[in-house]
Structures are given as structure tokens and as C-alpha cells.
Image (cartoon, rainbow, N blue to C red):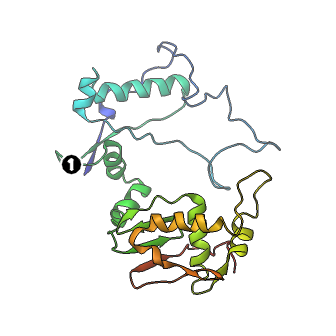
């Protein structure tokens, strides 16, 4: 990819001759309308402390065919943008360049432009390469970081409360959890009038969870007369969150 200057198309028009353009909130403010000040007199701007904004870059993704279909060419479009800039900020200096890419190059137009013009964020993404495609895993994947369960690569349709119930057992792997403890932990914030289960109806919630686990339902074990326990099998993968779970135990 390379660059080709467009400034040769025509100089910046004389703002004194240019027709007036209606103001728009999407256009830069003129010197007569300064940047709003924050409390205390500090200017509101997204730049680090100790630096100052000296201009901006506007990436436009538009190939020649699309421009022609819109009834314009790239050179004219550049001149129009420069003219508007001169009208709103007569002291501004402009430079335009067109991004060139091999014919038939894939990708979004604006991304190609950013890469050709050496945009740091676009370069970093290009060097990093595409995001790895997650390969389906046979068996059960309990993804605590994303709050989901995969069964042979397919997402199980668990409700929020069903996932909470499973997560509570998973984080206490191998321990038998009494029904009363599950109710106290998972329905602690319930307000009066909500459907809070008792020790008998908690079995219904567990039964619904198991039904959605399909052939892997036995990872949630019933300990007769005591409660429930999570048993990990060889075909069970647990992906923990990168930060400690707030569900302490």
C-alpha cells in the first residue's frame, strides 16, 4: 500500500469568496465558539495532560466506484472538505492524501485507508493478526468468565439463575451443598413477593438445570438426604474469570 497526494487537485479556496455553510454540531467549532470549559476553567478535550491538540485526521473509506455511484469523484470530495474547513477555520492548514491498495484487496474501505496511512491502532491490529477462532470442544465447557455453558460446542439455554446455581456448585467442586445454603446464597437479595424456593422446590430448579445439561446432567449429583455436589468428569472444562470471583467460599 502507498500514498498519493491529492493537494495537486486545487488549492484551498479563499474563505472570503466561499458561500456560507449552515452550522452543524458535527463540524469543528470556529474560533468564535471556543471549546466548552469544565468546572474550574479547564478545557474539555481528550488529550493527555501536558499536550495540546494541533489538528485531526479524518479517515474516509470510499473507493472510486462508490464515489462515482454517488455522483462525485475523490478529488472533488477532497476539495469540498477543504473548502468547508477553510470557511469554518480560515487559519487552518490542510493536506490530503489518497490511500492506494492492490486491486481487489479485501477488508472494509476505512480499515484499508487507516492501514495505508499508518494509523497506529490499525498497524497494531494488523501485526497482531486476526482474533483466533475458538474451536468447538467436545463435552462440557463451563465458562465462568462469559457466564455460559457449551455442550459439544453448542450454547446451553440456561437462565441467569440456573447458571448461578451451577456456578455456585462448580466453585465448591467436590463439596456437598445443602439446599438451605443454596437458597440463602442465591436468593439472598430477593424482595418480598418474589418466587423464592423452599428446600423442597429447590429440587425443581436443579431438575430444570439438569434437563438443559442433556447427556451431561450427572455433573450435578444428588447427595441423598444432604444436598447437591458438582462432580467434574474428564470431558468437563472449566474456564475461570481472569479476576477473582465475587462468589467467595
Which residue, as the protein is rendered here, is positioned at the far right? 40
Q: Is residue 238 left or right of residue 228?
A: left
Give the x, y percent position of residue 12: 41, 26
Image quadrant in which you'd find residue 71: top left
Q: Is residue 176 above or below residue 150?
A: below
**Is residue 147 something that shows in the picture?**
no
Nearer-the-camera pick, 241 or 151 = 151
Name which quarter of the figure residue 74 lies in.
Answer: top left
Name above or below for residue 144 compared with residue 18: below
Q: Which residue is mark 1?
A: 105
Q: Is residue 108 left or right of residue 57?
A: left
Counting from the top left corner in percent of width and height, residue 22 is at 54, 16
Q: Is residue 35 left or right of residue 74?
A: right
Q: Nearer the viewer, residue 89 or 185?
A: 185
Closer to us: 246 or 152:
152
Figure check: 94 above or below 42: above
Amino acid at each position: 500500500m502507498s500514498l498519493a497526494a491529492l493537494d495537486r487537485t486545487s488549492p484551498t479556496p479563499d474563505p472570503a469568496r466561499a458561500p456560507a455553510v449552515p452550522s452543524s454540531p458535527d463540524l469543528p467549532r470556529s474560533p468564535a465558539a471556543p471549546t466548552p470549559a469544565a468546572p474550574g476553567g479547564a478545557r474539555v478535550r481528550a488529550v493527555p495532560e501536558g499536550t495540546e491538540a494541533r489538528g485531526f485526521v479524518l479517515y474516509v473509506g470510499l473507493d472510486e466506484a462508490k464515489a462515482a455511484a454517488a455522483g462525485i469523484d475523490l478529488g472533488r470530495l477532497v476539495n469540498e472538505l477543504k473548502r468547508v474547513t477553510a470557511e469554518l477555520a480560515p487559519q487552518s492548514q490542510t493536506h490530503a492524501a489518497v490511500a492506494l491498495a492492490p486491486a481487489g484487496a479485501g477488508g472494509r474501505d476505512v480499515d484499508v485507508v487507516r492501514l495505508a496511512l499508518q494509523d497506529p491502532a490499525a498497524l497494531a491490529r494488523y501485526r497482531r493478526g486476526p482474533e483466533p477462532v475458538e474451536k468447538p470442544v467436545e463435552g462440557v465447557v463451563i465458562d465462568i468468565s462469559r457466564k455460559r455453558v457449551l455442550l459439544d460446542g453448542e450454547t446451553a439455554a440456561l437462565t441467569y439463575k440456573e447458571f448461578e446455581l451451577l456456578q455456585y456448585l462448580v466453585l465448591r467442586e467436590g463439596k456437598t451443598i445443602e439446599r438451605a445454603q443454596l437458597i440463602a446464597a442465591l436468593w439472598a437479595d430477593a424482595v418480598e413477593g418474589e418466587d423464592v424456593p423452599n428446600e423442597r422446590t429447590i429440587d425443581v430448579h436443579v431438575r430444570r438445570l439438569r434437563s438443559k445439561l442433556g447427556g451431561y446432567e450427572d455433573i450435578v449429583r444428588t447427595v441423598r438426604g444432604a444436598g447437591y455436589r458438582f462432580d467434574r468428569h474428564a470431558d468437563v472444562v472449566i474456564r475461570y474469570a481472569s479476576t477473582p470471583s465475587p462468589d467467595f467460599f
